[in-house]
Every structure is written in C-alpha cells, then in structure tokens.
Image (tube, grey):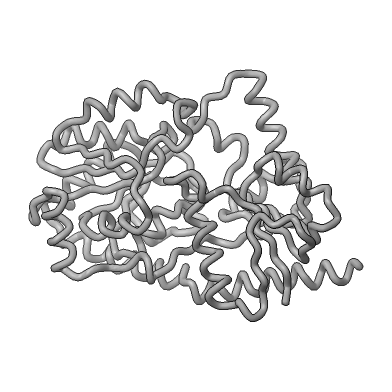
Amino acid sequence: MIKINMFSSADKVAGQGVGSAYIELINLLKERFSDEFEIKINDYHRSDLSHYHTIDPQFYLSTFSKNRGRKIGYVHFLPETLEGSINLPQPARGIFYKYVINFYKRMDQIVVVNPTFIDKLVKHGLDRKKIKYIPNFVSTENFYEKTAEEKAAFRKKIGVPEDKFVVFGDGQVQERKGIDDFYKLAQVNPDIQFIWAGGFSFGKITDGYDRYKDMIDNAPSNMTFTGIVDRNDLVNYYNICDLFLLPSYDELFPMSVLEAFSCGAPVLLRDLDLYRAIIDGFYQKADGFSDMNAFINKANQDRTILDKFKQKSKEATNQYSEDNLSKIWHDFYTEQYKISQDKK
C-alpha cells in the first residue's frame, strides 16, 4: 500500500473550485484504488507521498519534516491570478505573493490543472521538469442531466416559468469572474432570467466587496443571486438553464464549466487563451459583452441553435471522464512512489 497524505483546507470554505476539485479527487481515489492507496487527510505521521492542495502556513512548516516523503504541490493559482480576487494592502500583498511561490518551490513535484501555467511557473523560478499537467474532472454520478419532469419540478420550486429562457453562472462574486458583464446582461435583457450561484468566499477582503454587495442588494427583478449553493443542489441549476455563462477574465480549469458540461448544458465563455488549451471546440466563444449579448438574444429567439452545444458538452464530458482521469492519477502516484523509493 502506498501511503498518501492529503494536506488541504479546501473544503472548509464553500463555493471554491479548489474545494470541488479536491473532493472529486479524494472520492475517486477511495472508490477505485482503496486496495493500492492508503489515503490520509492532514495527518502528520510518516507517509510515502504528501500531496499539498492548499498553501496553509502549518502545511508549509510540515514540508521541513522528514516524515513527509515525496512532496507534491497542486497549483490552483499564481500571484497574478489573485488580482481581482482579494484586496490586500502593500506590503502584505507582496509578502503573500512571495510566500505562494516559496511554497511551490518547496515541492518535489508540481501538478497544474492548466498547461498554460507551466511557462508562468518557470518564469517564477521553478524547474520545468518537475511540473506535470493533469486536468480537473467531475463525477458524473453527482453532475448529470436530469429528466424533463425533474427539470420542470425544480423550475416550479424556484418560481421560474417552464418557457422562460434562463442564463446561469456560478462562482465567487468578484471582478475577475466577470460579474459586471453578467449583471449588465440582466439589465439589458429584462425578458430573460439570469441566475448567479455564489457568494463572497473571501468575505470582506474580496476585491470590490462593497460595490458587489450593493449590486446584489439592488439587483433587477430578472437577476437572482442565490448565494453559495451546496454542490448537491448545484446540479439542479445546471439542469434548468438554457445556457451556462461564465464571463471570467481569468481562470485555470473552472470546475463550474466541467459541471455544466456534465449536466448537458450549452456553454458560453469569454474567449481566453487558457480555454483554447483545454476545452477548445466544446463551447461558444465571446470576445466581450457585445458578443455575449448577441449570442444570448440569438439563442433566445431560436433555441434549436443550442442543440449542437448540448452535444459538444457531452463530448467534453467523455474526454474529461472519471475513467480517463483515474488512470492518469493512478499512474502519477505510482510513478512518484517509485521515484521516492529509487532515491532511498
């Protein structure tokens, strides 16, 4: 048995993609490889591999222990990707950003969820040979397309007419998520229902907190902010939407997009380089607000154009399936264990 210790606090703050990715991986390993991998959570006893999912200070200190075995770091963000997410004054911001990179440099192996991060990490001084790309995935048992009857029942439950065109998005309420465009789209399309699931996971240090709090409190009648929604309930929102929209300016490998794919929802995204590297061809691209607005109105007038995007979502789900990713993770951990044994 290979002893793998997972260091993480990702599931303590609701509404974060990091936490969703962590939960999916833990469940996959326990369900499929319990006879090969012994998984521990935040355990400081001796292990063969220590996989760090978050960068908590106590975890950083633990990297100096000989009990940690081979240290694996999961990179879900870089200092530059935190801009527009949290608002820290100088010099605290500079100190924190330096800490993030120092944490990654303590690792023997780095895993990124988006290949575009590899060059950026190298520029920060990390060894390219120690960086591996492994994409995110979601469980099709938790995120799946529901029946027409189930969809109708949930629409009724939340007070949305069956024939109402619904645009749904989710994620933390912050500038980099493109909330301003989502809000403006609701303002200029009063006949369409817009729903955003998510809240302030970083609390009042969220960049622009006061402004976004005011937007939520004064949202137009066709715009609903649900607050943070439990992952078990999110599946219902993906299922009742006609279109999933994530207007983010910056992402890694958003779990929300994979969840939307898995539920068969057509997906509209801002055209970002990082998406081209991982999910090109599976979604409708938009350069900005005008493109988003044009496609939403076109789809509202002729909903049959969304059929091909539902099919693309199914194709994306097959590519990022649990079966494919389980083999990748199995091979990865096995290889890391072999390297650790060879160095003894």
Query: To which quarter of the image does residue 290 belong?
Result: top left
Residue most extreme to the right: 344
Please provide percent x and percent y for residue 244: 29, 52
Number of on-image labels: 0
On the image, which quarter does residue 180 sit in?
top left
Q: Residue 39: in sight, yes or no? A: yes
Name the residue at the top extreme.
90
Q: Residue at x 32, y 40 (%)?
A: 227
Is residue 103 found left or right of 141 in the rendered image?
A: right
Above or below: residue 2 compared with residue 242: below
At x 83% / y 67%, what residue is drawn?
340
Compared with residue 335, is residue 284 higher up or lower down, i.e. above or below?
A: above
**Image height of 314 relative to 23, above or below:** below
| Nearer to us in this view, 133 or 282 | 133
Question: Camera-side residue: 9 or 98?
Answer: 9
The answer to whether residue 130 of the structure is visible from this angle is no
Q: Is residue 137 left or right of residue 113?
A: left
Q: Residue at x 31, y 46 (%)?
A: 169
The residue under the point 26% across, 54% down is 237
Image quadrant holding the C terminus, namely bottom right
- The quarter of the picture where the N terminus appears is bottom right
